[in-house]
Image (cartoon, rainbow, N blue to C red):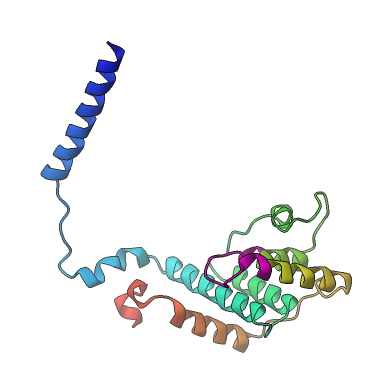
């Protein structure tokens, strides 16, 4: 008896779903190529997409050996501070992700460096994310021992503006608003 009730409930739910889909079909947008505009309705969305693209550019520079970890961490900090301010993971979580012992305190520069290390695990940044993260952790340990993470290099406005302009080109064009092009 119970099995029959469950089967009837499933059939009823499926029937209601079909009815809704048939009775309330979605309109096809008049211009399907612009159908993605709703993803960029808020300028904050665009800013976040550009920030992510900029962090990817910084990470690729680090992986390629054209930038050291302290410089990458400084750029991440600069990008995090842009409005809307980025929400980042607490240093303890970043340290745990990097395999560091629990209970250690990490200063701001170290936390930013750990954020970069975690970022290197993103798909598509390199052929071997684990290897990229291991190399960055070696840099982290070395830079930490030498005190190079206590005071990160300054990101000058021209440099930051150039990074954002380069990242803006990386953001897919279909997400840009008509007024941005």
Residue 133 visible in this rendered orientation of the protein: yes
**In the depicted structure, whether residue 115 falls above or below residue 2:** below
Q: Position of residue 143 (x, y in %)?
A: 82, 73
Any part of residue 120 in sight = no
Image quarter (top left, top right, bottom left or bottom right) of the N terminus? top left
Q: Is residue 15 above or below residue 163?
A: above
Where does the magenta region start and end?
118-132
Where residue 176 appears, as percent x and y from the top left, is: 36, 75
- Position of the C terminus, as image quadrant, is bottom left
Predominant SS along the magenta part: loop
Q: Nearer the viewer, residue 85 or 39?
A: 39
In reply to whether residue 122 is colored magenta, the answer given is yes
Instruction: State which quadrant residue 21 falls in.
Output: top left
Q: Residue at x 63, y 81 (%)?
A: 61
Picture residue at 18% right of the left edge, 70% below the top:
31
Query: Outermost residue, right direction?
Result: 146
Taking the image as shown, residue 53 lies to the left or right of residue 178, namely: right
User: Going 20% across and 37% down the picture, which residue do you hit?
Assistant: 17
Q: Report if residue 31 lies within the magenta region.
A: no
């Amino acid at each position: 008896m119970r099995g029959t009730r469950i089967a009837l409930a499933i059939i009823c739910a499926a029937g209601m779903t079909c009815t809704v889909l048939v009775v309330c079909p979605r309109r096809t947008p008049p211009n399907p190529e612009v159908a993605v505009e709703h993803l960029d309705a808020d300028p904050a969305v665009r800013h976040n997409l550009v920030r992510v693209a900029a962090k990817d550019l910084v990470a690729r520079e680090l992986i390629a050996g054209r930038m050291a970890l302290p410089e990458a961490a400084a750029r991440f900090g600069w990008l995090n501070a842009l409005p809307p301010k980025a929400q980042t993971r607490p240093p303890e979580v970043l340290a745990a992700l990097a395999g560091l012992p629990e209970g250690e305190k990490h200063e701001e520069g170290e936390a930013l460096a750990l954020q970069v290390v975690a970022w290197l695990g993103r798909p598509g940044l390199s052929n071997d994310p684990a290897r990229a993260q291991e190399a960055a952790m070696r840099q982290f340990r070395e830079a930490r021992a030498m005190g190079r993470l206590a005071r990160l290099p300054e990101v000058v406005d021209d440099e930051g503006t150039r990074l954002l302009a380069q990242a803006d080109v990386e953001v897919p064009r279909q997400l840009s608003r008509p007024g941005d092009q």
